[in-house]
């Protein structure tokens, strides 16, 4: 396998050299290395500034990090739109602000997409192999490339997506929008949907580029300017600055993406999944979306499923009380319920088992996640404490070794609080339930599947014996071994 890869790479390089032998090759190399003198020398030696290589790339496409060389090429008649993958997209994605301006001023089309056409590459590979003659040409290799070419489809990259995925290149976004860059795409998607999926803070962008920017370019034969490893703030803005520019276009910021999520829910979902040091940038974006008028009660139903999520429930799972309060202040319905394969939506709160089904309100999620500040706030705001969960759930109490997977009906917040053993929260909920009728709660143990420690599958957990058809809160507390809470709840007639 390794030898085949080596032959393949050598073949690619050989074709490149054949296609760009002499001054043309020298010019491309000068562009990659940022060598202005060598670029001038190549042009004086007769290099064609608009020549394309086997992949449809031109010299100017490789000069995107170097404004002086880009200007030299433009002065000598280079097409500012470049080849199949425009230099403008490369410059936007590489924080090369000066080159973005040069290209736009020279007439580059801000809406020309990047086209990766693998068919051209395969065709050149086939032609080069056939040129060896019938006896020397590798027929199996030709057949493999012909099959690959038959199935290959061009990849289209919209200009905005080229840099919204990996940068906070604020000045480039501003210039591109001023020149008429479209952010609503032919396939029905838009740039905002891309942005919220990949948004990140200024600090994290800088850290990423410090670690990977120059090294990444070097792997493709490019020399980088020194600023790549220490992104200046004038190039690298904040996520909210990027968002503000996108929203200024009037883009629909409640439109669902291909996965069924609104921009707000997509941002919140991404925050849940993000590593800790990237969460704040996404929270800032979610905050701005809410402040700018995103529909705080718009549901997001995952494509090809009936799993439904709401902003308040997602924000609760994140655990950011400021975000929760902002949503409530903007009119979020406290009692919208999640229906999902796992209630903690994209993570599991206590074990590999998790929870699923429907009826999960924000306050229930807060209790499950041990977020007492959010749970207390939502209760004070009037959350309905009689709404119960229907589905499967991990029963995990304060009693050592008690954990099992159950099927439940009408498991309302008081039952979750009893399992957590949270005395103050139990008392608060009980007080709010005074004079109210709870729907009948029932539970039964599922099969033993999953009743094991997540770190040691040889460790088994015990479950309670469900002998009654329904359980009051006090009955349930007694069942799981918390007699003190059971007595308190019985005294409260629960």
Image (cartoon, grey):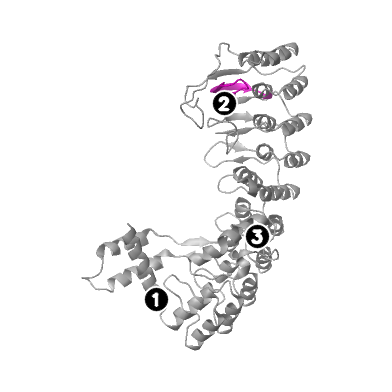
Q: Is residue 494 visible?
A: no
* Mark 3 residue crowding within 10 angstroms, few (<14) / some (14–19) / many (20+): many
Residue 80: quarter of image: bottom right
User: Mark 1–mark 3 contact, CB under 8 Å?
Assistant: no
At a point 70% along the width and 60% down the height, the residue shown is: 245
User: Of callouts 1 and 3, which one flags the residue occurring earlier in the amino acid sequence?
Assistant: 1
**SS at mark 2 in the image:** strand
* Mark 1 residue crowding within 10 angstroms, few (<14) / some (14–19) / many (20+): some
Percent position (x, y) of residue 441? 63, 18
Q: CA distance from mark 1 to mark 3?
A: 36 Å
Q: Label 2 belongs to which residue?
A: 394
Q: Nearer the viewer, residue 453 or 191?
A: 453
**SS at mark 1 in the image:** helix
Which residue occupies the extreme left position in the image?
Answer: 135
User: Mark 3–mark 2 contact, CB under 8 Å?
Assistant: no
Q: CA distance from mark 2 to mark 1?
A: 63 Å
* Mark 2 residue crowding within 10 angstroms, few (<14) / some (14–19) / many (20+): many
At a point 72% along the width and 22% down the height, the residue shown is: 423
Q: Label 3 belongs to which residue?
A: 168
User: Of callouts 3 and 2, which one flags the residue occurring earlier in the amino acid sequence?
Assistant: 3
Indicate whether 41 appears above or below 179.
below
Q: How many numbered marks does the figure carry?
A: 3
Indicate which disc residue 17 carries: 1
Query: Which residue range is magenta in the image?
Result: 392-413
Percent position (x, y) of residue 279? 65, 47
Indicate whether 161 appears above or below 360.
below
At a point 53% along the width and 72% down the height, the residue shown is: 61
Q: Nearer the viewer, residue 443 or 6?
A: 6
Q: Nearer the viewer, residue 249 or 68?
A: 68
Q: CA distance from mark 3 to mark 2?
A: 41 Å
User: Of callouts 2 and 1, which one flags the residue occurring earlier in the amino acid sequence?
Assistant: 1
Indicate whether 241 appears above or below 59.
above
């Amino acid at each position: 396998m390794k030898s085949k890869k080596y032959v393949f790479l050598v073949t690619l390089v050989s074709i490149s050299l054949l296609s760009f032998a002499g001054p043309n090759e020298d010019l491309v190399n000068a562009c990659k290395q940022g060598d202005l003198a060598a670029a001038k020398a190549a042009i004086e030696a007769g290099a064609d500034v608009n020549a394309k290589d086997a992949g449809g790339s031109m010299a100017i496409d490789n000069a995107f990090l170097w404004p002086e060389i880009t200007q030299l090429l433009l002065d000598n008649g280079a097409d500012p739109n470049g080849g199949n993958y425009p230099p403008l997209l490369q410059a936007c994605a590489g924080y090369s602000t000066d080159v973005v301006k040069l290209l736009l001023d020279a007439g580059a089309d801000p809406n020309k997409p990047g086209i990766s056409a693998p068919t051209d590459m395969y065709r050149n590979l086939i032609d080069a192999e056939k040129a060896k003659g019938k006896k020397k040409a590798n027929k199996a290799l030709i057949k493999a490339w012909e099959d690959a070419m038959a199935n290959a489809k061009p990849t289209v990259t919209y200009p905005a997506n080229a840099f919204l995925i990996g940068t906070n290149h604020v000045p480039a976004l501003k210039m591109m929008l001023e020149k008429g860059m479209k952010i609503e795409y032919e396939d029905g998607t838009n740039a905002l949907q891309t942005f919220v999926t990949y948004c990140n803070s200024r600090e994290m962008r800088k850290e990423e580029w410090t670690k990977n920017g120059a090294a990444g370019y070097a792997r493709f034969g490019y020399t980088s300017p020194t600023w790549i490893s220490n992104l200046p703030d004038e190039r690298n803005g904040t996520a909210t600055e990027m968002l503000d520019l996108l929203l200024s276009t009037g883009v629909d910021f409640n439109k669902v993406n291909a996965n069924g999520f609104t921009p707000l829910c997509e941002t919140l979902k991404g925050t849940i999944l993000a590593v800790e040091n990237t969460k704040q940038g996404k929270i800032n974006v979610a905050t701005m979306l809410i402040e700018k008028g995103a529909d705080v009660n718009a549901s997001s139903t995952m494509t090809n499923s009936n799993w439904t999520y709401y902003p308040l429930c997602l924000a609760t799972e994140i655990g950011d009380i400021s975000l929760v309060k902002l949503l409530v202040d903007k009119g979020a319905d406290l009692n919208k319920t999640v229906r999902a394969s796992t209630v903690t939506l994209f993570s599991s709160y206590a074990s590999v088992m998790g929870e699923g089904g429907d009826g999960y309100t924000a306050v229930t999620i807060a209790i499950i996640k041990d977020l007492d500040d959010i749970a207390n706030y939502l209760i004070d705001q009037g959350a309905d404490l009689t709404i119960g969960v229907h589905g499967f759930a991990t029963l995990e109490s304060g009693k050592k070794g008690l954990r099992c997977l159950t099927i439940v009906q009408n498991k309302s917040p008081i039952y979750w609080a009893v399992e957590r053993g949270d005395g103050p929260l139990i008392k608060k909920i009980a007080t709010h339930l005074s004079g109210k009728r709870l729907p009948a709660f029932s539970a039964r143990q599922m099969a033993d599947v999953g009743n094991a420690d997540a770190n040691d599958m040889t460790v088994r957990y015990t479950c309670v014996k469900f002998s009654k058809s329904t359980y009051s809160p006090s009955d349930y507390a007694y069942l799981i071994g918390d007699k003190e809470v059971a007595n308190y709840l019985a005294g409260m007639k629960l």
